[in-house]
Amino acid sequence: MSTTLVELPGATWRTVHRVVLPVDADADDLALYVDYDSAVSTPGAVGGGRPGDDADSLGAAPAAAGSGPSALAVRTEGRAENVRGRRGLVVDARTRVSFGTYFNAFPASYWRRWTTASAVRLRVELAAPGTVTVYRSNARGLRQRVSAATVAPGRPLVADLSLAAFGDGGWYWFDVAAGASDTALVSAEWQVAEEVPAPASTLSIAVTTYNRPDYCLELLRTLAAAEDVRAVLDHVYVMDQGTQLVADEPGFAEVAAALGDQLRIVRQGNLGGSGGFSRGMRETLRAGVSDHVLLLDDDIVLEPEGVLRALQFAQACRTPTVVGGHMFDMFDRSVMHSFGERIDKYRFFWGSVPGVYERHDLSAQNLRATPWMHKRVDVDYNGWWMCLIPVAVLREVGLSLPVFIKWDDAEFGLRAGEAGFPTVSLPGAAVWHVSWTDKDDGTDWQAYFHERNRLVAALLHSPYPRGGRIFRESVFTDVKHLISMQYSTEVLRLMALQDVLSGPEHLLATLPTRTAEVRQARKAYPDARTSTDVEAFPRAHQRKPPRKGKEPTSPNRYTLLPWAAAVVARHLTAPAPEALERPEKQVAAMDSTWWRLAHYDSAVVSTADGTAAAWYKRDPREFRRLLARSAEAHRQLWARWDELAAAYRGAMPRFTSPQAWDGVFEASTVPAPQAQPATGSAAGQDAGRAAGEAALSGAGEER
């Protein structure tokens, strides 16, 4: 049975988006694939602003909580037992299910905007009689019925649908309803019309790993079992930068044998995410067989169908396009954590695209009832948890900045965009990853990379004089850490400033060693010395009760300056002697804001993950010394901004070039006998074990 809503005589139809069900029929993420509820909206979107969006500004208010609802919707429990493999689903008698879900609705507006496709064909096959109803939405999220038909076995529904009206947003999807007897979806797929078929593309996958062999092996196991992905896969490059090797993990030999010659294990010193992914890019360029390289974090759960969708989409794009996947929360599987990222060029800070909410739970509020997800979201970059990059883009703009971690993905997106290569975060292509909600890497050893790499990226790409607001925010953030007794964090930020001021040559020169130096520099300060023992610190005792029984609150824009002056003056005076012998307060990580910590002479503060705590102590001498250093460094940054911007922009093509990276790789790669490609044989596993015994350059715990 066919429904023709668009005429395209002579067009070639190519399958680009198959309807799939969960790999393990896990009820926790079933709502992302099939929806048993009606499209009834709750009072507002389930979500909130990015935690810490404005954390770098003393005067910033806490992040907004989105349009959070007053109550969550009552949802129907998904019927995981009805899942029949990856393509099939039983629909019980007299029930209706919708495939207007994240993984199975068709993101029509993205195909309309970025590709050569002008129409889409829906093909649905049922095992028993049932009704298939096709819907579409517009950019405001309003649902519109397109057509309905009774489908019988052997007579699949074929509906040809125009993409013309999807300029600003909108999806297509379909529902299946059973009559007096059960029916079942056998298969369904979305195809796009092409007047001139695009040549078939292949990809290589680059995975950077550091001491997460269990996660990395599970990712390889997923790829080995994904036959459709394997059909378009040239190589999987695993850049193992750790001492706990994936080749030593139980079960590696079996996975390596399954992947065979497609698997390549590369051993090198820890060069961070930028060094690992640049190595994957470089190996892909050197092999010369792939059209794209897909960057994947090692600690993800992959939906293999998303790999195919990203590749099919990239193949159809009008111009070479970076195609990224979204990020769901690994530990809260139905929660969308990142749907679209941009750079606020005035602040030069990353965050969600305006109108997009983080922490949106699609099991509590389905796609059809979430209006903001129906407007097309255009992004500046995509995180490298999943990001497909055309080889043509690498040849034009180079590899990653040599920055170890932080801002490498954002800067690459900006650089590619300035060269005319857009980035698209494609709905229906996603991974599950540990979210950053319970992390605070802005105060640990990674604070160095946050400060340095943000400034470098701004020097390279900011369109505003002296970087817009970034200078003011950098000063405010220094003060914030100092009044919070986070002296180790401030020391690292000053190291970052000095490196920026030294010029661009430091990036490549310090890449293998700076992390170890940063970690060593933190050790001298009490706020960096943590303990997991809850009895490691004396019991807290507050000398004076809170004023009027209320905890400190954030100053507003009118009281900020006098408040800051008073607090800074207080931190220049000696602390109470008893506060250095006994902490005044035990502070949970979620409560350790700068406006609270500023009022204590000492406090025991929990780490963001809740596993340990550190005893912060006020030190007027260190406060004065670091404040003076910050003032001088920022004075130089202000005076030399234009000079530094010209230097970094002039040097960028050199230190992002494959040739520059080759020198770094040559110095850090484990000798050839330990870096042979994996073949799936016992010899490959033995080589991995031997590599694990080799000494590594560099240090660090995360990318």
Image (tube, grey):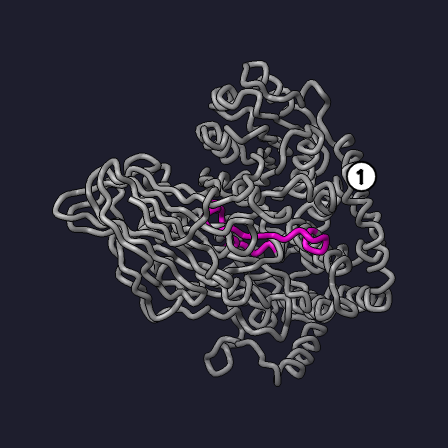
Q: Quadrant of residue 697?
A: top right
**Residue 423: x %, y % from top left:** 61, 52
Q: Quick check: 354 above or below 210?
A: below
Instruction: Bin the neighbour count of mark 1 within 10 Å (Cα to Cα): few under 14, some 14-19, many 20 and up.
Output: some
**Residue 286: x %, y % from top left:** 71, 30
Three-letter amino acid code at disc 1? Ala
Please tell me which residue is depicted at 33% across the width and 50% down the height of the picture: 3
From the viewer's perspective, tell me whether residue 670 is left or right of residue 207: right
Q: Residue furthest front?
A: 9
User: Of residues 191 and 490, which is closer to you in this image?
Assistant: 191
Q: Quick check: 539 above or below 124?
A: below
Stretch in magenta: 416-441
Per the image, the residue denoted by label 1 is 660
Q: Give SS at disc 1.
A: helix
Please tell me which residue is depicted at 59% across the width and 46% down the height of the picture: 384
Q: Can you say which quadrant of the picture contains the C terminus?
A: top right
Q: Is residue 520 visible?
A: no
**Residue 476: x %, y % from top left:** 69, 70
